[in-house]
Amino acid sequence: MGLLIGMDEAGYGPNLGPLVVSLTAWRVPGDPRDSDLWSTFDAIVDQSGQRQPSHLHVADSKDVYSPARGLLRLETAVHTGLRLAGIAADSFHGLHSQLCHPAPHPLREPWHTPADLTLPRVADEQQVAEFRDDWSACCAAHNVTLTRIASDVVQPSRFNALTRQADSKGVALTRISLELLRSVWDPDSDERVLIIADKHGGRNRYDTFLEEVVDGQMIFRLQESQSCSRYRIGNTEIWFQTRAEQHLPVALASMVAKYVRELSMELFNSFWCQRVPDLRPTRGYPVDAKRFRAEIANTQRQLNIRDEDLWRAR
């Protein structure tokens, strides 16, 4: 058996709301480099979304979700994956605590305390349960196990601190991602491991950052290029790849990250729209974030909410 891990993020570009990094870890038969989970799960998942409602739409989160398209496809697939990994959460706070286990950073922001969201928001729980049973049966038939889904939800104050420390937004993302990875990956493992992550911006070299988390293991560079940077550490290969969502473990990680960020933004927008008349919600991206920030400025001062807790400086 081998271990196949996919990683991705959501919310790297916005000024408002969290950065969310997520991973999915799968135990697969044989060498994980030979594993094609799209083929394995062809009866359950579909990259195109054209086989709805008989299949789950699993792909890059940008292809599955948009405000115009709505949350249904994203939430149905994510909750099915969560159930497959043994996570059953009926609230945002419950989901946060299970995804960020064993040491979730507290949600201290006023839009998170004491407010919460009941889950799922729009997905049908009976449909999720049926999809989960079918996916579980398919896993059993192919000797595949989804062992873990994990996330790090980085709120603005921590993101700002990590970015200042690194003097680079991109370096902060890489370190956050590799720390999350180490929560599920042992570089000394005897089993074969393949880790696939979306590339972080335009970076081609990752070996210096891997050195920070592998406890002195030798790192062998296999490839460093614009399309893919590959490294070997013991029995592990790590790929930082453009369009990594073409691999199912990365696609599902992308969707989990997007889902958690959208839930967090729902709480954020609800908090401010209840306090500022006629305020339009925001997705947090730079141009609209400036509009939103200006419109809440007076209320922010009245509530003594620090810019550090609200606004991501980079």
Image (spheres, rainbow, N blue to C red):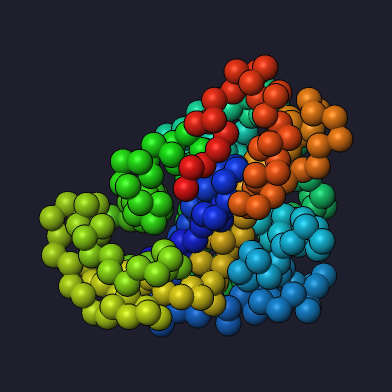
> As drawn, which residue projects farthest toward the right?
278
Residue at 60% x, 42% y: name it.
17
In the rendered image, which quarter is residue 138 located in? Answer: bottom right
> What percent of the width, then of the height, locates residue 61?
64, 64
**Position of residue 60 measured from the top left corner of the image (x, y, whole percent):** 61, 69
Q: Is residue 31 above or below residue 62?
A: below
Tell me which residue sits at (78%, 25%) in the image: 275
Front in this rendered view, residue 307 or 99: 307
Asked if one can make out residue 17 in the rendered structure from this viewpoint, the answer is: yes
The image quadrant that residue 292 belongs to is: top right
Q: Is residue 54 left or right of residue 40?
A: right
The answer to whether 51 appears left or right of 34 in the picture is: right
69 horizontally vs 170: left or right: right
Residue sitting nearer the eye, 28 or 107: 107
Q: Position of residue 24 (x, y in %)?
A: 49, 59
> Dividing the image into 4 quarters, which one contains the N terminus?
bottom left
Front position in the image: 51 or 131: 51
Residue 55 or residue 231, whichever sits in front: 231
Q: Give the left or right position of residue 162, taking residue 49 as reference.
A: left
Residue sitting at x 56%, y 61% = 254
Residue 247 visible within the image: no
Q: Residue 242 at what x, y percent from top left?
A: 46, 75
Number of numbered discs present? 0
Report the residue at 28% width, 78% height from top. 224
